[in-house]
Image (cartoon, rainbow, N blue to C red):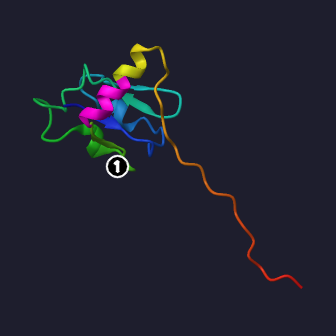
């Protein structure tokens, strides 16, 4: 099972530079890990380097269901879906005079 990068990614490139097998590459809004290339740093380090160097802990073990859905969508020609929550608008709850 490979690792994946979540929507918390801040696009700092620390993971890309430290990946010993070059499985990480930039995408539109965040970096992505190629599950066909990722070896979880087995034979290189005790724990995956991406997990170790990420300042926001966005590198996590990939879930089997996520990989299946992503592969199915890509097969259909859809771009990868990246969910990034947007900030809610500020509401002024001040008193009216």
Residue pictured at 28% horizontal, 34% vertical: 65
Q: Tell me, yes or no, whether the highlighted magenta stretch contains residue 54.
A: no
Say left or right for 76 vs 86: left
Tell me where the magenta segment starts and ends, as one range.
63-70
The C terminus: image quadrant: bottom right
Give the quarter of the image for residue 36: top left
Q: Main secondary structure of the magenta part?
A: helix
Q: Quadrant of residue 87?
A: bottom right
At x 39% / y 14%, what residue is drawn? 75
Q: Tell me where residue 70 sits by quadrant.
A: top left
Question: Residue 48: x percent and y percent?
Answer: 21, 38
Q: Secondary structure at mark 1?
A: loop
78 or 30, nearer to the observer: 78
Which residue carries the number 1 mark? 57
Farthest bottom residue in view: 97
User: In this view of the protein, which residue sits in the foreground, 90 or 11?
Assistant: 90
Q: What residue is rendered at 48% in x and 38% in y?
A: 11
């Amino acid at each position: 099972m490979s690792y994946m990068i979540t929507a918390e990614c801040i696009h700092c490139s620390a993971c890309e530079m430290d990946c010993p097998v070059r499985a990480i590459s930039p995408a539109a809004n965040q970096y992505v890990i190629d599950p066909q290339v990722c070896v979880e740093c087995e034979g290189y380090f005790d724990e995956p380097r991406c997990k170790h160097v990420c300042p926001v802990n966005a590198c996590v073990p990939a879930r089997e269901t996520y990989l299946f859905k992503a592969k199915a969508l890509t097969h259909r020609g859809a771009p990868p879906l990246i969910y990034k929550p947007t900030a809610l608008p500020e509401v002024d709850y001040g008193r009216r005079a």
